[in-house]
Image (cartoon, grey):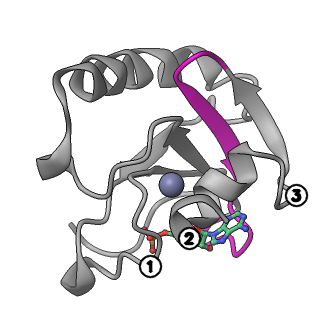
C-alpha cells in the first residue's frame, strides 16, 4: 500500500469506497464509521499529514476544496447545513495521517457544545 496510507489506497482503487465526488484535487467518500446521520470525508489527492506540512500547491488545493464543498451540499443531502472538522494529531483523535476534512450533517449538530 502506497505510503502505508488507507486514503492513498482508496484513491488507487486498492480499497473500495463509496465515492460521491471526484475532481483533479480531491475525492469525497462516505465515512466507513459514520459519526452523524451523514458523514463524508473530503480527501485531497496529494498525501500530507497535517496542515503544517502543506506545500504552496497543497494550500492552493485546500482553498479550492473549501470553495467546492458548498457546491456539493445538495448532492450530499446537506441542504440543512453541515459541520466541517479537521483533526490534527493525537489529542484531536486523528487516526488517518493523510489530511482530510470531515463533513457531518443530516441532523442537528447538538454535540459537542462548541
Ligand atoms: P480521523 O480520526 O480524523 O483521522 O478520521 C479518519 C476517518 O476515516 C474516521 O472517521 C474513519 O471512520 C474513516 N475511515 C477509516 N478507514 C476508512 C475507509 N476505508 N473508508 C472510509 N472511511 C474510513
Ligand atoms: Zn495518503
Mark 1 packing: few (<14 Cα in 10 Å), some, or many (20+)? few
* The disc label shown at residue 95, or none: 1
The residue indicated by pointer 2 is 4
Q: Residue at x 65, y 38 (%)?
A: 28
Say if the magenta span includes residue 105.
Answer: no
Q: Which residues are the magenta region?
A: 23-36
On screen, 68 above or below 41?
above
Question: Residue 56 location in percent, x, y?
Answer: 17, 22
Q: Earlier in the sequence, mark 1 or mark 2?
A: 2
Q: Say whether mark 3 is within 8 Å of ligand 1.
A: yes
Q: Residue at x 68, y 70 (%)?
A: 34
Task: Classify 10 Å Cα crowding around label 2: few (below 14), some (14-19), many (20 and above).
Answer: few
Quarter of the rendering occupied by the N terminus? bottom right
Of all residues, the one furthest to the left in this rendering is 52
Position in image of residue 73 (x %, y %): 62, 26
Residue at 57% over, 14% down: 71
How far separated are the C-alphas under marks 1 and 3? Answer: 19 Å
* Number of numbered discs overlaid on the protein picture: 3
Does the CB distance between marks 1 and 3 fall below 8 Å?
Answer: no
Q: Is residue 26 magenta?
A: yes
| Numbered disc 2: secondary structure | helix
Along the line of sight, which residue is nearer the eye, 110 or 29?
Answer: 29
Q: Which residue is mark 3?
A: 16
Place of residue 101 in the rendered image (x, y in percent of width and height, measured from the top left):
43, 48
Ligand 1 visible in quadrant: bottom right
Mark 3 element type:
loop
Amino acid at each position: 500500500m502506497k505510503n502505508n496510507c488507507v486514503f492513498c489506497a482508496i484513491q488507487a482503487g486498492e480499497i473500495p469506497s463509496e465515492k460521491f465526488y471526484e475532481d483533479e484535487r480531491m475525492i469525497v467518500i462516505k465515512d466507513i464509521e459514520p459519526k452523524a446521520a451523514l458523514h463524508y470525508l473530503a480527501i485531497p489527492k496529494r498525501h500530507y499529514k497535517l496542515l503544517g506540512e502543506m506545500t504552496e500547491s497543497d494550500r492552493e488545493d485546500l482553498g479550492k476544496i473549501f470553495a467546492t464543498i458548498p457546491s456539493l451540499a445538495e448532492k450530499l443531502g446537506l441542504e440543512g447545513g453541515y459541520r466541517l472538522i479537521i483533526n490534527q494529531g493525537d489529542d484531536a483523535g486523528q487516526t488517518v495521517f493523510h489530511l482530510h476534512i470531515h463533513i457531518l450533517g443530516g441532523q442537528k449538530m447538538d454535540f459537542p457544545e462548541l
